[in-house]
Image (cartoon, helix red, strand yellow):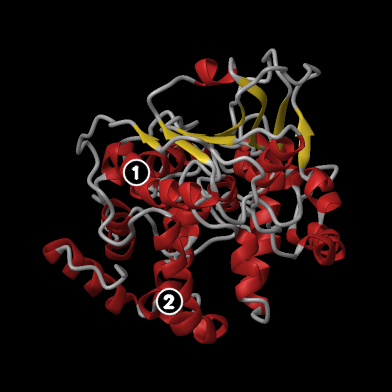
Amino acid sequence: MQSTLHDRVHRLNSAGFRNDAEYVLYCCRVNRRVDWNHALAYAVELANERVLPVLFYEDLEDSNAQANSRHHAFVVDGVEGTAKRCRHLGIGYQFCGSSVDQLVRSAAAVVTDDHPNSNFPAILDVASFAVDSSCIVPMRQIAKREYAAYTIRPKIHKLLPRYLRPVPELRVQRRWPGEPVIAPVPTSRDVPPSTAFRGGSDAARERLRHFLKEGLRRYAELRNQPSAHATSNLSPYLHFGHISPLEIALAASKANDFLEELIVRRELAFNFARFSADPASIANLPDWARETLQEHADDERNPLYTREQFEHAQTHDPLWNAAQKEMLLRGKIHGYYRMYWGKKILEWSRTPQEAVETMAYIHDVWALDGHDPATYANILWCLGLHDRPWPERPIFGKVRYMSFDGMKRKTDVDAYVSEIEHLERTVEDPLRL
């Protein structure tokens, strides 16, 4: 197991370990959990080698410039559980209250999360490491950008036997001498909390247990039927790192359809984000998609909506409005309707880039699974990323089209719209556990 852990480690600088240090610092930026966390496991390994304790530091730092009280509340929901688990294992825990620079001064080494969104400073005067615990197959094991699921799938499947295994139990040689420190954080209600989801690893595992009991057996047949509630609803917890995809995959090891989405499709998105300087740019689209959208740039678009109209669900389409209201209320849209949601924003926007920016903005502000590699890949999928050419039509060119009539044929639109209308009136959410 030790060698597979080291496969996940990326050295950030050439600085040495600090002598006379007080601890090894794990600076948690993405994977906000104690268990099933390879970065924390590596911090424990380094600390044990030096007979030092480990300090787990977490704050509200977020690469999302639009992060707000909805996101912060979801993070804070998990703090008490993280502190309790750290204390049980003998690991120090601090939430906010200090700057990273202050804590680094007393650290023998610094470990953080290896992630496309990570903005951790690499220029430190102490040995620093980034460890991938976001993907089952470490991102850096896929050496180049892959352009579709069919190209990355065989590479993922070849490597899975090596990496699809539990993280070893954390055992520290030297316990942290003090109690967890949880600093108060300012609270506001600029964006209300989700009606469906509360944050934290405990809530994530409760959600996983519910899916394994109630949803998994129906997933293959009903995953594209939003009113059936057969999907896992784990994307907010994966985004904030409250649960590991590895833990989920091992718990659902016989569900091939679900594992295709959790592993192949999700890790294709991480591969895309890793090799993209700006994952919200249409420059990332395959040549055929950019060319066909350009050829149809002057096609008439009627209706046209502004970002504000989209944000406030003010279109003529009852299904689209319901999907956007689900985003506003729950902080998440069912994946199948989110495809339709994005396709219509493309159809009703002045330019493809404006459409992408609208989708990214709405996700960044309202979604609990936004500002994420999977989100950016899903947004650009609406414009042809990881897809193939389809029969040509106005505005879309050869990009796949989705229609209201198609949604009516394939899904129970009326049931979904009724559910969202009831949720809007009562805030009584059937998805809340």
The number of discs equals 2
- Mark number displayed over residue 253: none
Give the camera-side residue of 15 and 294: 15
Helix, strand or loop status at disc 2 = helix
Check the image and name the residue furthest to the left. 425
Q: Amino acid at mark 2?
A: His
User: Residue 418 appears at what percent x and percent y?
Assistant: 22, 74
- Mark number displayed over residue 210: 2
Residue drawn 68% across the image and 57% down it: 387
From what the image shows, is residue 302 above or below residue 181? below
Foreground tag (1 vs 2): 1
Residue drawn 39% across the image and 48% down it: 367
User: Residue 177 appears at what percent x and percent y?
Assistant: 50, 35
Q: Is residue 49 left or right of residue 283?
A: right
Dot placed on the residue nearer the N-terminal end, 1 or 2? 1
Q: What separation in Å lies between label 1 and label 2 (alpha carbons)?
A: 23 Å
Q: Which residue is mark 1?
A: 76
